[in-house]
Image (tube, helix red, strand yellow):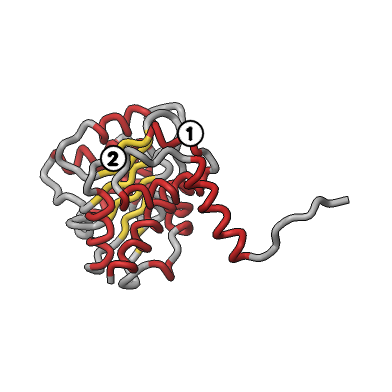
Amino acid sequence: MVASYIKDPAAIYAQSFERVRAATDLSRFPDDVAEMVIRVVHACGMPDLAPDLAFTPDVAAKAQSALAAGKPILADCAMVASGITSRFLPKDNRIIMTLYDDAVPARAEDLGTTRSAAAVEDWHDHIDGAVVVIGNAPTALFHLMEKIDQGWPKPAAVLGFPVGFVGAAESKAELAARPDLDFLTVHGTRGGSAMASAAVNAAALLAGRAA
């Protein structure tokens, strides 16, 4: 016999976030950043993620202000782009994901890097004041920081959640050490598209409430 279970969508939604709040130590986060943390924890089911999160105090405010101003979201992969809930976006913000652009494979070969990193080159004209969200490729985050060091305009916020065992921890540690960028990231190998898009969704909801 299948055990009884909750079927009401509203009750599932409410109880899920209620349990995340109860299970997660949010004491060191500003209230708006805590809302982002709650969504990230909800996306991965890991309250123990919270101590590994690194952030700048203004990251939530910067991200929500950018979205409220209609700035685009730059995503490193299709899974991140697909995880962003469009109905939450306050200005029907454009989601830009350039990984599959025709020029990317040849550019990656010319640059001697991954396609994810080469795709970042197409962000130049959109990045000023935008929200950058990376949920897959450490090379994309590394390349982004290289381009900023070379004089590119800065995004409003970097939500950096590349995942894996080669370069992920290192790229996020470098992001967390930068004084020139507002960011939310997680130390170590954990990360992924679900966490990354959840952080964007939280910022979008905050922007909607502030409108």
Left or right of 37 in this view: 182? left
Q: Secondary structure at mark 2?
A: strand
Residue drawn at x 22%, y 31% is 177
Separation of residues labelled 1 and 2 (CA atoms): 16 Å
Residue drawn at x 22%, y 54% is 62
- Residue 109 in sight here: no
Left or right of 5 in this view: 203? left
Residue drawn at x 81%, y 51% is 3
Q: Amino acid at mark 2?
A: Phe
Q: Secondary structure at mark 1?
A: helix
Q: Which mark is residue 178?
A: none
Question: Mark 1 or mark 2, which has the lower sequence index?
Answer: 1
Residue drawn at x 25%, y 50% is 157
Which of the 4 quarters of the picture holds residue 73?
bottom left
Q: Position of residue 4 (x, y in %)?
A: 78, 55
184 or 128: nearer the viewer: 184
Location of the C terminus (image quadrant): bottom left
Depicted 165 relative to depicted 25: above or below: above
Left or right of 89 in this view: 164? right
Q: Going by the picture, which residue comes out furthest to the right?
A: 1
Depicted 195 relative to depicted 126: above or below: above
Q: Position of residue 187 (x, y in %)?
A: 37, 31
Q: Position of residue 20 (x, y in %)?
A: 51, 46
Which of the 4 quarters of the picture holds residue 179?
top left
- Residue 188 in sight here: yes
Q: Which residue is mark 2?
A: 55
Q: Which residue is mark 1?
A: 48
Q: Position of residue 195 (x, y in %)?
A: 45, 46
